[in-house]
Image (cartoon, grey):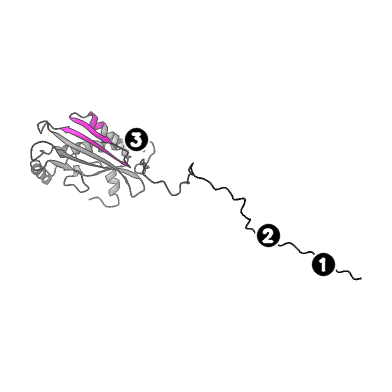
Amino acid sequence: MENKSNGIENQIKNQMPLFFELSPEALLSKARLAFISNEAETSEKPEYEELKTRRYALSVKEVYEIALGFASRWVNWRVVNRGKNFGGMAQLKCDVYSVLLGGNKLELSLIFSEERTTFGGICTVVNAKSVSTAPTKGDLGENRRWIALMLYSLDTAVAERLEELNAQGIEPGVLQSTSNSTPESNDAPIKQSENTVTPSPDHSAKDSTPKEAPQRKRLTIKQL
């Protein structure tokens, strides 16, 4: 089991040794849920490792563009809604047409959000949810499989991108935020607005510096 000190680094690199969790217990559970559940989603502590929330040491924009590229190219995938730069967040909605479910579609959503890491950098958190529209009680595991495929593809693509950054001497996990909503540092110089009026000195005001008292002339008395 991973210790707590390097847990975040391992989550950000996030390379799974297996595409799907294939333990006997997991396989039995998946077979049961395939006939009684028509949705799947990621979480921090999922029942299956392939549905674990992802964290990548790249900006929201970069991870979003990678996912959009996959969804635009894959067969039976259709991007129906997309949006980014919402205060460090982005969203991607796709229709995935399942042959296993007779051509019925899955409504799959990806949410990308910015998160500050414990070592002062910025990472992107990726969560996903998929719901089957097939007129059946179960989804035959399709929602889980397509989410897992997208996340595994992101794992691979992000790992390649991080290797490129390392080759350029850029340390992963310390990238700066690209969100417009990120407050500026308190150490940044304050810029004067064009509409700001600088008060001119008041020349009519009396000088507050005390003036020296005038010296009195000495009176000399001559004797007659």
Q: Amino acid at mark 3?
A: Glu
Residue 83 place in picture, x, y as percent: 28, 36
* Circles 1 and 3 in contact, beta carbons < 8 Å: no
Q: Amino acid at mark 2?
A: Lys
Q: CA distance from mark 2 to mark 3?
A: 73 Å
Q: Secondary structure at mark 2?
A: loop
Question: Of callouts 2 and 3, which one flags the residue occurring earlier in the amino acid sequence?
Answer: 3
Q: Label 3: few (<14), some or many (≥20) within 10 Å?
A: few
* Circles 2 and 1 in contact, beta carbons < 8 Å: no
Asked if residue 37 lies left or right of residue 78, the reply is left
Residue 193 place in picture, x, y as percent: 48, 43
Discs 1/3, front: 1
Discs 2/1, front: 1
Residue 197 place in picture, x, y as percent: 51, 45
Q: Amino acid at mark 1?
A: Leu
Residue bearing the label numbered 2 = 211
Q: CA distance from mark 2 to mark 1?
A: 24 Å
Question: Of callouts 2 and 1, which one flags the residue occurring earlier in the amino acid sequence?
Answer: 2
Front residue of 204 and 36: 204
Residue bearing the label numbered 3 = 164
Residue 65 included in the magenta stretch of the image: no
Residue bearing the label numbered 1 = 219
Picture layout, residue 111 above or below residue 7: above
- Which residue is painted at 16% across and 38% down in the image? 145
Asked if residue 191 lies left or right of residue 178, the reply is right
Residue 168 place in picture, x, y as percent: 38, 36
- For the C terminus, the image quarter is bottom right
* Circles 2 and 3 in contact, beta carbons < 8 Å: no
Q: Which stretch is magenta?
A: 69-98
Discs 2/3, front: 2
Question: Of callouts 1 and 3, which one flags the residue occurring earlier in the amino acid sequence?
Answer: 3
